[in-house]
Image: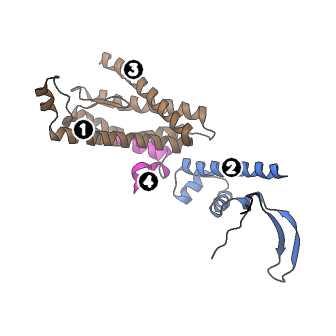
């Protein structure tokens, strides 16, 4: 059970993972559209407001492609195994499935309207705090899935694997934010 | 009880050699110093993996279906065995 929760990639990878991952990203896009939760970076989400459905689909696709591209490049540079793009792409797509839960929790997580004690107290109700903690848990879970997906598909172990993953994830976050900021200007 | 063939000396951690072989039928014994085959230095599980790999004509795709594991997981297992064989080869050559 633990392996299925944190490392399903031991059993599912390649085309099968990609198929499931596309389904996951489609569901995440619809959930994000319905709750107006924007994934405006690989490691970033904000309740910006309503937008057309295609924006939410593009957010999922850009975040996934950024991670896949950067981690594939990292794997090609640092792994001694024969890496398949379909494995990196498929496992990273499937690893995004906690995004559905994060999107569903979106409306409960509100930013305070100002920095006055009243507005902060108004924003941080017990329900908001629980939702924030749950969102944080799901984000950590998603990052753990990203890492395990990378570890299985790229076969880089130990400190080198962790370092390549962290740098890759931060770079992918930066790229996705840059691309999405351009997309928001067009939209 | 299944016994595993030891290949490392418990005393000094050097690679072990074979001193004698015996016929299971007539008990004839052959003595000498023989090197253990490289594959004998792998664990039982790793040897079974190699046998399954050869039986599936070296197809990782077939192996992943047989073992119920994903393709990259099977490839990683194979890469780990390759690394181990290379290390064992180095150790054996260093002792010569």
Residue A43 drawn at (x, y percent): 37, 31
Q: Which residue is mark 4?
A: A3
Circle on res. A158:
none
Does residue A115 appear anywhere in the picture? Answer: yes
> Nearest the camera: B79 or B65?
B79
Q: Colour of chain A?
A: brown
In this picture, residue A182 sits left or right of residue A89: left
Task: Give the Cα separation between the discs numbered 1 and 4.
Answer: 26 Å
Task: Look at 47% across and 50% down and name the residue there.
Answer: A12
Colour of the chain lettered B? blue
Q: Chain of mark 1?
A: A
| Element under disc 2 | helix
In three-dimensional space, the C-alpha distance between marks 1 and 3, rounded to whole angstroms, equals 26 Å
Q: Main secondary structure of the magenta part?
A: helix
- Chain of residue at mark 4: A
Query: Element at badge 1?
Result: helix
Q: Residue at x 55, y 47 (%)?
A: B72
Region rendered in magenta: A1-24
Per the rendering, the mark at residue A132 is: 1
Q: At which x and y percent is residue B4?
A: 67, 68
Name the residue carrying label 3. A178
For the residues carrying marks 1 and 3, which lies nearer the camera in this image?
1
Q: x, y percentage for residue B82?
A: 68, 49
State the residue position of label 2.
B82
């Amino acid at each position: 059970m633990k392996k299925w929760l944190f490392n399903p990639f031991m059993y599912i990878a390649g085309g099968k993972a990609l198929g499931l991952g596309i389904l996951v990203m489609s569901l995440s896009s619809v959930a994000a559209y319905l709750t107006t939760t924007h994934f405006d970076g690989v490691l970033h989400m904000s309740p910006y407001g309503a937008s057309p459905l295609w924006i939410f689909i593009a957010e999922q696709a850009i975040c996934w492609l950024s991670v896949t591209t950067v981690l594939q490049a990292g794997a090609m540079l640092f792994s001694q195994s024969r890496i398949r793009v379909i494995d990196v792409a498929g496992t990273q797509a499937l690893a995004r499935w906690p995004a559905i839960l994060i999107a569903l929790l979106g409306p409960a997580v509100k930013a305070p309207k100002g920095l006055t004690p009243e507005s902060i107290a108004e924003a941080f109700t017990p329900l908001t705090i629980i939702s924030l903690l749950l969102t944080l848990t799901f984000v950590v879970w998603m990052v753990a899935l990203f890492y395990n997906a990378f570890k299985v598909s790229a076969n880089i172990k130990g400190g080198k694997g962790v370092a390549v993953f962290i740098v890759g994830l931060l770079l992918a976050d930066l790229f996705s934010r840059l691309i999405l900021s351009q997309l928001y200007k067009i939209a | 009880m299944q016994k595993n063939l030891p290949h490392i000396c418990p005393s000094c951690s050097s690679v072990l050699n074979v001193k004698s072989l015996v016929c299971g039928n007539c008990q004839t014994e052959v003595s000498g110093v023989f090197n253990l085959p490289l594959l004998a230095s792998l664990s039982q599980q790793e040897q079974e993996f190699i046998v399954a790999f050869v039986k599936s004509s070296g197809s990782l795709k077939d192996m992943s279906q047989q073992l119920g594991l994903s393709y990259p997981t099977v490839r990683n297992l194979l890469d780990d065995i390759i690394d181990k064989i290379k290390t064992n080869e180095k150790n054996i050559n260093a002792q010569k």
